[in-house]
């Protein structure tokens, strides 16, 4: 979960990926032997060309279809500027929650979490 001010980085998934064309957080599957944090760092480097550092875990929950466990982390960019670096994304944007709602399709889990984070920031949390 990359955030700048009140905007969050989302990518549009490529047509050959699961949930094609969905707008979502930068994500990926954990490889054997990787910690969740190592997965986050690797996926950011592969997909958006940035070196990142995990600052905290935000939540874990099952996907809507129950096939996956989703782990969300707050991440800080240490080096680089996000850009599309592989064939997994069609587009990349910094959006507010209201802007993400208008991008279709998207995941309710993402909207719920981004709404909560925006409200916490507004309340000084």
Image (tube, grey):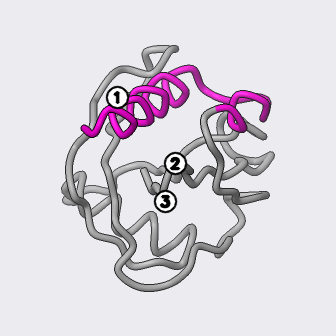
Determine whether, in the image, residue 99 is placed left or right of residue 2. right
How far apart marks 3 and 2 lie (CA) works out to 6 Å
Residue pointed to by mark 2: 6
Disc 2 versus disc 1: nearer the observer: 2
How busy is the neighbourhood of tag 3: few (under 14 within 10 Å), some, or many (20 plus)? Answer: few
Part of the protein shown in magenta: 98-125
For label 3, the SS is strand
- Badge 2: residue crowd in 10 Å (few <14, some 14–19, many ≥20): some
Residue at the top extreme, as displayed: 65
Residue designated by label 3: 4
Q: Report the residue at 48% width, 22% height from top.
A: 112
Label 2's element? loop
**Which residue is nearer to you in this view: 15 or 119?**
119
In terms of image quadrants, where is residue 40? bottom left
Distance between mark 2 and mark 1 Cα atoms: 26 Å
Q: Mark 3–mark 1 contact, CB under 8 Å?
A: no
Left or right? Give the position of 102 relative to 93.
right
Q: In this view, does 101 lie above or below 22?
A: above
What residue is pinned by disc 1? 69
- Mark 3–mark 1 Cα distance, whole angstroms, equals 26 Å
């Amino acid at each position: 979960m990359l955030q700048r001010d009140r905007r969050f980085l989302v990518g549009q998934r490529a047509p050959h990926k699961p949930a094609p064309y969905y707008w979502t957080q930068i994500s990926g599957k954990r490889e054997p032997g990787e910690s969740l944090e190592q997965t986050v760092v690797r996926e950011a480097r592969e997909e958006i060309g940035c070196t990142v550092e995990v600052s905290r875990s935000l939540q874990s929950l099952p996907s809507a279809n129950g096939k996956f466990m989703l782990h969300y982390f707050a991440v800080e960019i240490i080096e680089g500027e996000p850009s599309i670096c592989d064939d997994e994304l069609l587009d990349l944007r910094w959006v507010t929650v209201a802007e993400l709602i208008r991008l279709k399709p998207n995941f309710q889990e993402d909207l719920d979490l981004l709404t909560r984070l925006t409200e916490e920031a507004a309340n000084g949390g």
